Amino acid sequence: MNERSMSSVVELLGPEGPLARELPGYEHRVGQLLMAEAVERALKEGHTLVCEAGTGTGKTMAYLVPAILSRQKVVISTATKALQDQIFSRDLPAIERHLGLQVDAALAKGLTNYVCLRRFEEFRGSAEAMRPRYAQSLELLERWVKETETGDGSELVSLAEGDPIWSEVCSSSETRRGAKCERYEDCFVTRMRRRAEQARIVVANHALVFADLALRGHSDDQGGALPSYEAIVFDEAHQMEEVATDFFGAQVSSSRIDALLRDLAKAFGKARSGTVLSIDDAPVVAEQVHRASLAFFAQLASPRGAGEGGRKLLPKDEWMGPVVEAYHRLDTALEAAQRLCEANRRDDAIGAVGARALQVREDLALISSSDAAHAVTWVEARAKSTAVGSTPIEVAGTLRTGVFEKTPAVVLTSATLATGGSFGFFRSRVGADSDLVGTEELLVPSPFDFESRALLYTPTDLPDPNDPSFSQATAARAAELIEITGGGAFVLCTSVRAMGIIHEALGRVLPKRPMQQGDAPKQVLLGRFRADGHAVLVATMSFWEGVDVAGDALRLVVIDKIPFAVPTDPVVSARCRAIEEQGGNSFSSYQVPAAAITLKQGFGRLIRTQRDRGIVAILDRRVVVKGYGKTLRASLPPAKRVGSLEEVREFWRRVSATG
């Protein structure tokens, strides 16, 4: 590091620092400096910091600079790949360029983000690759694989999101062979892990961090998914609980077993021309697994096990009779496939399939034997498959012992962590409440002028959200608001069904048909939205956060309902029941604060810079007429509150005139 790197965060980020001297128009932010100093303390003293940093604080710089200056091995973890890529490709280079710091950083993503050279070559030479559905995508891949240095699929912007070819060629925990693979030395995952071992700053994501936690098993061994580290920063920390909940559970789907059987057929088919013996039973065993899988998932998807519309509870007493019989037949068939592969494990590809069969068996065993006091077993009938899973009711204990009580310094930050000015709800949900760990709290408000630049419209004259006419009424009111602003609108819905109804209704009355989530990949839609300047986009929860449209292109955000978690979801229901059994009120202590954080994320789409202005409309009358509405409103930025369209028009005339 050079001499400047030894400076303090105050010297680097303060009003007399290099950013203020070198960047035209740079504005010193007091909140950023407060947060940076708090991060610096946490890293130096070894404690936990919980920091809500409002939009515009500059929180990314506020934790990156102290992390670099600390000279510690620090993991930066994000919830989304978009922020992960932004930090590595934009923010860290900016620090090097403008602050004169030498940044020793590596990017680490989950296995499925990287192309597997072995699988790519196998797929390219297979009959499957000749199918017309893969022709264009395969051509793109062939050119890219020759040029890429990282193998990270995010570079392939021309490949459509969800293109089926990626699942055929990407790495995964089930297909990776490690040092046995003939492509191990030039493998992109191998390169990524070696670079992460060497770097001081590792930019990762929550799922990879939790995978590392699970592999280490709370011990001090070095066998994790990440190298050992001295400190960790969780950005987008409000998503920690849900990511951990998904990760620490187990699930098996019919499509997962189908993929296993396809790879089994490929492995044995390729081996027929080699030296592997005793493979004639492979088609018979594969058919047995296929039939047993069909029967098992058919039992689960029956009316008593599951239905359309999300996860359905699978009570313990369902694991008897026809269901348990079908499970045992599937387990027996999978065991036969596993043993067949083990008998031919001289072939690495066959051995890898055998290991996957064992993993499926172990996951099914965990699901079938889950303790109802600590986990929820569920079934979900999806469009093309059925899944069964077991999900932990709470992850706070796992994170408390595995992260906060084990890692010297932990920083948790997001624009939305507090509810009603308190971090109590968030800390209890993620385990950041250990008596063994010192914790500092910091709430840094946004520097933006919400009082004069933003308006919160909360009408009370629309139907109740449970009324069948609510979505149509929402569309009509949204159309009136869109007319006021001349477009530039996100219409954010709490369900796919509502999105469809509102999109169709708006399409009949607006002069230009609105865009809808799913019409194109997310980044393509956002690009079109920004370029248009007057567009309308109707979307669901994936556009509530992690979406940044600065400037006048987005000037209206319409939210149809308070984003309460679905009460019939088995995991939500179990969490509420656990709170009630402990004498608490699940609605006020879980549902309301969780909704407040999500609502604040939706509001946060509007104002992204000092010059932004606009309107947020929450069309759910409960935010005003219900007692809990006060808590929800108190968690939102201090924009002026109005209840009539005329007040909305007057506000828009004023801010449009002043610019």
Image (cartoon, grey):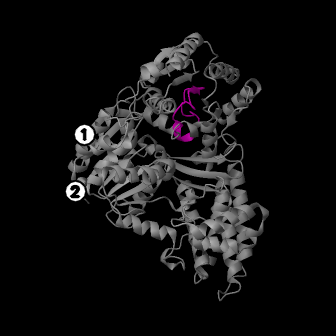
Tell whether position 571 is magenta.
yes
* Image coordinates for residue 190, horizontal then vertical, percent: 47, 70
256 vs 205, left or right, is right
Q: Quadrant of residue 610?
A: top left
Amino acid on which disc 1 is placed = Glu
The residue at the far bottom in this view is: 275
* Image coordinates for residue 80, horizontal then vertical, percent: 49, 48
Task: Pick whichever, 297 or 440, lies toward us.
Answer: 440
Amino acid on which disc 2 is placed = Glu
The residue at the far right in this view is: 132
On residue 16, the disc is 1
Q: Is residue 492 visible?
A: no
Which residue lies under the disc numbered 2? 3
Q: Are marks 2 and 1 in contact (CB under 8 Å)?
A: no
Tell whether position 493 is magenta.
no
Q: Is residue 631 above or below residue 23?
A: above
**Label 2 crowd bin: few (<14), some (14–19), many (20+), radius 10 Å:** few
Report the span colored magenta: 548-573
242 vs 276, left or right, is left
Task: Pick whichever, 551 or 134, lies toward us.
Answer: 551
Q: Is residue 567 visible?
A: yes
* Image coordinates for residue 33, horizontal then vertical, percent: 28, 38
Total labels drawn: 2
Q: Quadrant of residue 649?
A: top right
Q: Quadrant of residue 38?
A: top left
Q: Earlier in the sequence, mark 2 or mark 1?
A: 2
Q: Secondary structure at mark 2?
A: helix
On residue 366, the disc is none
- Mark 2–mark 1 Cα distance, whole angstroms, equals 17 Å
